[in-house]
Image: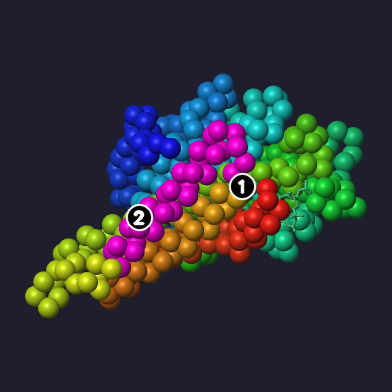
């Protein structure tokens, strides 16, 4: 076991930190208030190689390991968790999914621009009646000649309004249950594809989330990922890596909350001294720092397993479960340390709380993570 980062890891962490401070931080508050998508920032992230971090250089990516991606995700999310989720979906759901399960044709056509950040991706599993119960897919794909025609609705899609390419799960054979689900790459300009309402959210407000509609949406058969009937396994396998990304996003928020609390506790005076001298505050700070470290260790372990080709789905679920809980707890504690100032927009901590909550919901709720962990423990897998 080695707790040291390599020079390369430190360099990536530092460059993500600098970019976050210089290019993302100045507009984060205003974009949150206006719910404004950070188009220019996403473009720059692509140019710097942050949108296809784990993709092989053969397909336009940076060819880095999962730990590098997580370190960058933490730094970006520390400053703006909205940018974090945009980056996370493109990297660990879309690029990873296509690189692992796409044909050469699909990789050349779609992965290369996605990995270079020239195009943006979205991952479309959730539906109005298929959130946690994701096998209950109502979107249908009927084959005619060399095309599939998709009909249905997708919900809660991150990058819904901004993406160019969408990985869409749809039922190709209803009689086979989840083994009758397949995955397709759908372009935004395909006939029959539509974007629905953009959600007005509590947090991560500058990322866009929307529903999507498919009305006889015509998709070439060659745009299927993996093979017919493997779409649900595709979604689950891909989400395992996605959950590591969301754990990193949550750690970013948890760490930002902690650092804001320390700074404020040293500045704010009560009873004639900085409140950092009060044991009640010190206990909160100690708990916050310990939780951040625990969340990191769980998440780094999941990275190490993934990168060494070992099973990691249980550890990814544990990392997301714990890190998202810590994000919410640390944001709440940071508000408590700030007192009334924590409750107003002038200080950043109220946004941390609003942004933190979603990490317990998307890419599998905390309850689903517990179910995944419990099944693994019981089945001994
Ligand atoms: N890794 C790999 N495979 C998995 C898996 C995992 N973590 N969890 C389930 N599977 C596989 C099972 O092995 C099984 O495969 P086989 O049939 O080939 O053996 C298949 O999936 C079905 O599993 P179950 O029989 O256990 O099905 P279930 O209905 O009882 O449970 C579930 C499935 C775990 C609840 C699953 O539906 C699930 O994870 N739900 C949550 C969905 C989710 O995370 N949605 C997030 C939406 S995407 C998003 O949020 C992105 C965004 O924009 C930010």
User: Residue at the location (31% across, 73% down)?
Assistant: 336
x, y percent for residue 192: 75, 47
Element carrying mark 1: helix
Looking at the picture, how far across and down is residue 262, in whole percent?
Answer: 24, 61
Give the residues drawn in magenta, as a range: 284-312
- Main SS, magenta region, reads helix
Total marks in image: 2
Is residue 80 visible in the rendered structure shown here?
A: no
What is the x, y in percent for residue 360?
Answer: 53, 62
Which residue carries the number 2 mark? 255
Magenta stretch contains residue 301? yes
Q: Residue at x 75, y 35 (%)?
A: 226
Q: Quadrant of residue 329?
A: bottom left
List x then y, in percent, for residue 211.
65, 57
Going by the image, does 49 lie left or right of 145? Answer: left
Tag of residue 313? 1
Report crowding for label 2: few under 14, some 14 to 19, many 20 or more residues within 10 A (C-alpha). many
């Amino acid at each position: 076991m080695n707790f040291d980062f390599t020079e390369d890891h430190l360099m990536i962490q530092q460059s993500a930190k600098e970019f976050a401070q210089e290019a993302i931080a100045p507009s984060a508050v205003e974009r949150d208030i206006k719910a404004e998508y950070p188009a220019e920032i996403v473009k720059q992230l692509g140019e710097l190689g942050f949108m296809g971090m784990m993709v092989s250089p053969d397909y336009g990516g940076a060819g880095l390991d999962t730990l590098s991606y997580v370190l960058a995700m933490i730094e970006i999310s520390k400053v703006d968790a909205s940018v974090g989720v945009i980056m996370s979906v493109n990297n660990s759901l879309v690029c990873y999914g296509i690189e692992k399960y796409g044909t050469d044709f699909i990789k050349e056509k779609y992965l290369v621009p996605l990995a270079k950040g020239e195009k943006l991706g979205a991952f479309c599993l959730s539906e109005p009646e298929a959130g946690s119960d994701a096998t209950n897919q109502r979107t249908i794909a009927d084959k005619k000649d060399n095309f599939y025609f998709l009909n249905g609705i997708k919900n809660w899609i991150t990058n819904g309004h901004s993406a160019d390419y969408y990985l869409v799960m749809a039922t190709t054979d209803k009689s086979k249950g989840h083994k009758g689900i397949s995955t397709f790459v759908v372009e935004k300009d395909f006939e029959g594809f539509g974007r629905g309402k953009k959600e007005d959210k509590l947090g991560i407000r500058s990322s866009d989330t929307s529903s999507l509609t498919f009305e006889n949406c015509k998709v070439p058969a060659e745009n299927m990922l993996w093979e017919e009937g493997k779409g649900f396994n595709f979604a689950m396998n891909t989400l395992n890596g996605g959950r590591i990304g969301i754990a990193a996003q949550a750690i970013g928020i948890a760490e930002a909350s902690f650092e804001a609390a320390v700074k404020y506790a040293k500045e704010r005076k009560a009873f004639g001294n900085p409140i950092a001298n009060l044991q009640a505050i010190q206990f909160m700070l100690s708990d916050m720092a310990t939780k951040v470290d625990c969340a990191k260790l769980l998440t780094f372990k999941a990275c190490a397993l993934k990168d060494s080709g070992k099973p990691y789905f249980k550890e990814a679920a544990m990392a997301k479960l714990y890190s998202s809980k810590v994000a919410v707890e640390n944001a709440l504690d940071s508000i408590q340390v700030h007192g009334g100032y924590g409750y107003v927009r002038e200080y950043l901590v109220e946004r941390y709380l609003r942004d933190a909550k979603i990490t317990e919901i998307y890419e599998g709720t905390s309850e689903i993570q517990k179910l995944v962990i419990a099944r693994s423990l019981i089945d001994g897998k």
